Amino acid sequence: MTSMTYQEKILAGIDGLPDDVLAEITDYVYYLRRKVTLPDFYAAEVQHEVLEYTLRSGRKDSLVHLEEEFANYDQQFPRD
C-alpha cells in the first residue's frame, strides 16, 4: 500500500467518530510523530517513565516492608 492509500483509509476510518475518540486519535498521532521525528527525546522520555515507575514501585515495596517490620514495635519495645 502506498502512503496515500493509508491516509485515505485513516480518513475513511475516522469519519463520523465522536469528538472524544478523535481527540484520542490525535494524541496518538502526535505520540507517533514524536517517536519518529525525535527518537532520542522519545527514548529519554520512555527511560524517565520506566525509572519513575520503578521508583514508585520500590517505594511502595519499602513502605510495606517497613510497616510489617514495625507493626508491633510499641509492644515489643514499650517506652518507659
Image: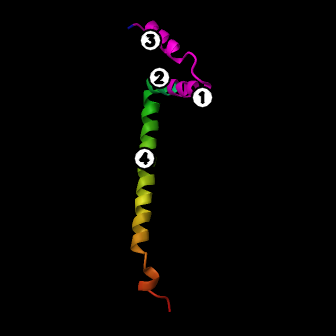
- Residue 11 is situated, as x and y percent measured from the top left of the image, at 52, 13
Q: Residue furthest right?
A: 19
Whether 38 is drawn above or below 48: the answer is above
User: Does dot 1 land on a helix, a strand or a loop?
Assistant: helix
Q: Which residues are magenta?
A: 2-29
Q: Choose top left, top right, bottom left or bottom right for residue 66.
A: bottom left
Give the residue type that dot 3 points to: Tyr
Residue 51: mark in rendering: 4
Could you tell me which residue is drawn at 47 percent across and 22 percent down? 37
Of callouts 2 and 3, the N-terminal one: 3
Query: Would you name the residue on which mark 2 appears?
Result: 37
Between disc 4 and disc 3, whose residue precedes?
Answer: 3
Q: Nearer the viewer, residue 8 or 45?
A: 8
Mark pair 4, 3: CA separation: 36 Å
Which residue corresponds to the image point at 44% horizontal and 58% vertical from the top-left?
59
**Which mark sits nearer the N-terminus, 1 or 2?**
1
Within the image, what quadrant is residue 2 found in? top left
Quadrant (top left/top right/bottom left/bottom right) for the N terminus: top left
Residue 19, position as x, y percentages in the image: 61, 25
Name the secondary structure under disc 4.
Answer: helix
Contact (Cβ within 8 Å) of mark 3 with mark 1: no
Nearer to us: label 2 or label 3? 3
Crowding near the residue tagged with mark 3, few <14, some 14–19, many ≥20 C-alpha atoms within 10 Å: few
Residue identifier under label 1: 20
User: Residue 44 at x, y = what percent?
Assistant: 44, 36
Distance Cα–Cα, label 1 vs label 2? 26 Å
Q: Residue at x 53, y 18 (%)?
A: 14
Q: The disc labelled 2 sits on which kind of residue?
A: Thr
Q: Residue 44, relative to residue 23: is it above or below?
A: below
